[in-house]
């Protein structure tokens, strides 16, 4: 049975493993080669910045400690990334009005920079949207769960917490 894109039907475990092991490195390579828009090039953005920016886009202003937990890095690492991105006007940090000891990170309000960040991240989002639109809610949930389980297995963790489906996922 073929394991090329567009394959339908059934795959043995061995065929699925082969397909994923051949596909994932290509996927990661393509993500790493996603060109950074001109207005952001001076910031020397890397894939690790993409993850941080995606969290801010999806979740809005977020405390440094929460970003560190989501990115699975030390808060000092996030602080360094935020400082670097802040110097280039990509993100802003401010004290939490409810607890002045906490630092909240947000995407910049500068429209040109926000458009550049959106452009950098939108390609991947459009690709996932197209792929997931072609799947049933059950297929989407199965795929997401499989990727989460794979990540946990590679990291040597126990079963990850399942991601709660949104209303759109159940549609």
Image (spheres, rainbow, N blue to C red):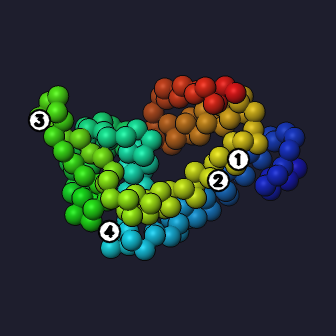
Q: Residues within 10 Å of mark 2 (few under 14, many from 20)?
A: few
Question: Alpha-carbon distance for marks 2 and 1?
Answer: 6 Å
Which residue, given by chain and number where applicable, does mark 1 sit on? 131
Within the image, what quadrant is residue 72 found in? Answer: top left
Which residue sits at x=70%, y=27%?
A: 171
Asked if labels 3 and 1 touch by Cβ distance under 8 angstroms, the answer is: no
Which residue sits at x=54%, y=25%?
A: 164
Q: Is 10 placed above or below 86 here?
A: above
Label 1 residue SS: helix
Which residue sits at x=67%, y=25%?
A: 170
In primary-sequence order, the first of circles 2 and 3 is: 3
Which residue sits at x=22%, y=63%?
A: 87
Asked if labels 4 and 3 touch by Cβ distance under 8 angstroms, the answer is: no
Q: Tag on residue 43?
A: 4
Which residue, given by chain and number where applicable, does mark 2 sit on? 127
Asked if labels 1 and 2 touch by Cβ distance under 8 angstroms, the answer is: yes
In primary-sequence order, the first of circles 4 and 2 is: 4
In primary-sequence order, the first of circles 3 and 4 is: 4
Residue 23: percent from left, percent from top:
67, 56
Residue 8: percent from left, percent from top:
86, 44
């Amino acid at each position: 049975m073929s394991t090329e894109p567009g394959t339908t039907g059934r795959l043995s475990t061995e065929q699925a493993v082969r397909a994923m092991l051949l596909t994932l490195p290509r996927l990661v390579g393509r993500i790493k080669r996603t060109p950074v828009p001109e207005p952001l090039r001076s910031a020397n953005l890397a894939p690790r910045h993409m993850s941080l920016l995606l969290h801010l886009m999806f979740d809005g202003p977020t405390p440094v400690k929460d970003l560190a937990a989501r990115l699975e890095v030390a808060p000092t690492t996030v602080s360094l990334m935020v400082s670097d991105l802040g110097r280039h006007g990509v993100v802003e940090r401010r004290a939490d009005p409810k607890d002045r000891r906490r630092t909240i990170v947000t995407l910049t309000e500068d429209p040109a920079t926000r458009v550049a960040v959106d452009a950098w991240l939108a390609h991947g989002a459009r690709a996932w949207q197209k792929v997931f639109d072609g799947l049933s809610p059950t297929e989407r949930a199965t795929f997401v769960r499989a990727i989460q389980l794979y990540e946990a297995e590679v990291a040597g963790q126990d079963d990850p917490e399942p991601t709660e489906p949104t209303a759109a996922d159940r549609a």
